[in-house]
Image (tube, helix red, strand yellow):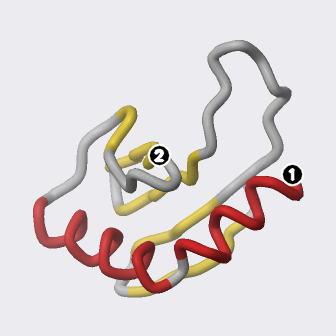
Amino acid sequence: MPEISMFYDIIIAMYWERKTEHHSAHFHEIYNEFDCKYSIPKLSIMEGSLPNKAHRMVISWAKKHIKDLHYAQLRI
């Protein structure tokens, strides 16, 4: 899975996924043993769990990069 950002041991990744009827724009967050899938543009957790502090940092990062995330997902 291609990493698009890394900070405080948090990895943000995005990868190509075939479009299906259940496909939605999202990115993945990996932090230690935690793995979450976040929706774009709502920035809500679709799957997984994450400690609150790490979740707040991911949301803060994503808000700053929402246009880039949305554009990247459209290009995939």
Q: Residue beneath label 2, please? A: 39
Residue 3, quarter of the rendered image:
bottom right
Outermost residue to the top: 21
Amino acid type at circle 2 is Ser
Q: Estimate how packed mark 2 is, as few (under 14), some (14 to 19) or many (20 or more) residues with alpha carbons within 10 Å.
A: some
Gap between marks 2 and 1, in whole Å? 15 Å
Describe residue 1's horizontal placement relative to residue 7 as left or right. right
Q: Quadrant of residue 53?
A: bottom left
> Is 36 placed above or below 22 here?
below
Q: Whole-percent x and y of residue 58?
A: 35, 71
Left or right side of 44 for 52: left
Question: Which residue is at 40% across, 46% downward?
Answer: 35
* Disc nearer the start of the sequence (2/1): 2
Task: Choose between 58 and 3: the one closer to the eye.
Answer: 58
Dots 2, 1 in contact, CB < 8 A = no
- The residue most toward the left is 52
Residue at x-position 63% and y-position 67%: 69
Residue drawn 74% across the image and 55% down it: 73
Residue 63 circle label: none
- 63, 3: nearer the viewer: 63
Residue located beneath label 1 in the image? 76
Say what secondary structure mark 2 lies in: strand
Name the residue rendered at 57%, 47% in the picture.
26
